[in-house]
Image (tube, grey):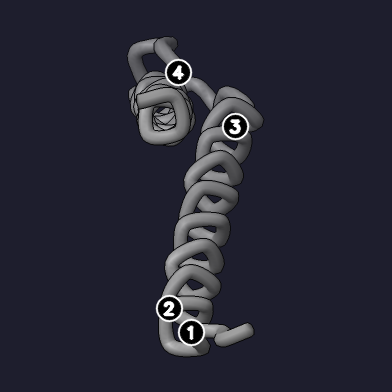
Amino acid sequence: MHIDWAALGTVFGVSLVATVGLVGLFTLGIVGLSKQPGPATEGGQPGGSLLMARAGAYVCFGLCAAAVAYGIYLIVA
């Protein structure tokens, strides 16, 4: 039996990078959703950073869903 160690190392490296990247992206989404509204500005409106944080969180979750869908596509196809 012959084991191709270079290919095994490549698969391990790509899997590690993809896993860390996906978990990091999901973590950014959770942090974006956990932001609380800050103090009101002079006009009585809360700052726009909460809206930007939520939008960024949804983008992160969308990218995570796209990565999972692409992985399923690679497995099925």
> Contact, CB < 8 Å: mark 4 with mark 2?
no
Q: Amino acid at mark 3?
A: Lys
**Chain-order first, disc 4 or disc 1:** 1
- Camera-near label (4 vs 3) is 3
- Camera-near label (2 vs 1) is 1
Residue 32 rendering spot, x and y as whole percentages = 52, 34
Residue 51 rendering spot, x and y as whole percentages = 39, 19
- Is residue 16 shown above or below 64? below
Q: Work out how far the residue at label 3 is from the one at label 2, CA to CA, in angstroms.
A: 42 Å
- Left or right, residue 29 beside residue 10: right
Among the 4 quarters of the image, the one containing residue 10 = bottom left
Q: Name the residue located 43 percent from the left edge and 67 percent from the top edge.
A: 14
> Contact, CB < 8 Å: mark 4 with mark 1?
no
**Chain-order first, disc 3 or disc 1:** 1
Q: Work out how far the residue at label 4 is from the one at label 2, CA to CA, in angstroms.
A: 53 Å
Q: Is residue 41 visible to us here?
A: no
- Which residue is tagged 4? 46
> Contact, CB < 8 Å: mark 2 with mark 1?
yes
Q: Work out how far the residue at label 4 is from the one at label 3, CA to CA, in angstroms.
A: 12 Å
- Which residue is tagged 2? 7
